[in-house]
Amino acid sequence: MTGIIEKPRHSETSNNSYSTRPNDMNVLGVVDFADCDQCSPYPNRWSSIREHISAPAAEFMGAFILCLLGCGGNCQANLSANKSVSASPAGNAVTSNLSWAIGLSLGVWISANYSGGHVNPAVTLAFATVRGFPWKKVPIYILAQVLGALCGAGVVYATYFNAIDIVEGGSNIRTIAVSGNLFGTYAADYLPSVSAFFAEFIGSAMLLTGVFMFTDKRNGPLPPGVLPVGIFFVILGISSALGMDTGAALNPARDLGPRILTAMVGYGGAYWLWCPILGPIFGMIVAAFFYDSMLYRGLESVTNRPSEQAERHHLHSCARTKRNGVAETV
């Protein structure tokens, strides 16, 4: 009788763990798809859609934050200078420059891992021209950047609408000289067109140089989160040193988006293509070519792509090395 083992009861053999009940609906919500190479990277339908829209959405959010804080800093500093709005000023040129620097820094921070953190059509065009960024993505990036800047400026306008009424002298009065220039950028009256273009060209070239400098691996591996901080100092330096003449647009979307907003709310539709659009685009493309021609070694740059002769020599050398290696091991 000792060889007979008592059959366990049903309650003793039942197992309440999820592993024995793979079809139990309670399992849902605890599955880690990252642990399975064979599983779909999209656990639900929305994640599949998000994969295609996350990059432009990131650019939209980056540009939105840039103009929300930048235009907001301009409005707070300038509107509060009016005694009818505030008993004492709540900002100045320094706080305005800090607002733009912080806005771009946070805009890059939120978008860098999802879209590359361009937040600027001129940056997108420079990367497409020199660094192999896909041209098919350029239109949607630029559209997202302009729309983000437009919406950011729109939120600022809605926030300061009452103060603008006081400063302008009425809700039906909107003038560029009084409050419209808090959104778009306008060159100083004494500045000729060629000088305005040059100012934007130089400032934008410096900004793109800073971006390339921080992302160049030969300058040392960049710790996570440091790039936005570096961009903060670059923008702060440019706006503090070169911003007086034109307002330092440095970004076609940063100017075009808010300028569309001012046209929509009654400021008029005048626009100056030469300075805030073409200046940054040409400045960044020229700076990109110069940096890559003189310093950069990465193969994604058009200045470093191997010639056909170099490729043939490389293939021939590799084939010979492999044959010698096989001969040595035999």
Image: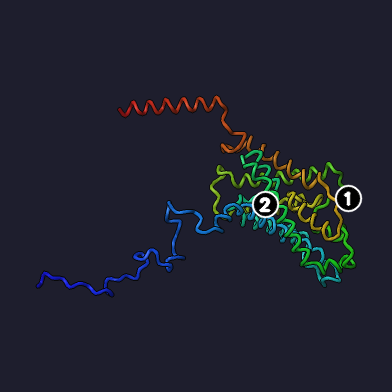
39 w.r.t. 4: above or below:
above
| Residue at 84% in and 66% down | 164
The residue carrying mark 2 is 119
Q: Quadrant of the N terminus?
A: bottom left
**In the image shown, does 269 or 202 lie closer to the viewer?**
269
Foreground pick, 95 / 13 = 13
Lateral position of residue 162 relative to residue 115, left or right: right
Which residue corresponds to mark 1? 189
Number of other residues with Cα within 10 Å of mark 2, as a class: few under 14, some 14 to 19, many 20 or more = many
Q: Secondary structure at mark 1?
A: loop
Which type of secondary structure does the marked residue at label 2 adopt?
loop
Q: CA distance from mark 1 to mark 2?
A: 29 Å
- Name the amino acid type tagged 1: Asp
Which residue is at 53% across, 47% downward? 221
Picture coordinates of residue 210 (x, y %)? 65, 47
Q: Position of residue 11 (x, y in %)?
A: 28, 75
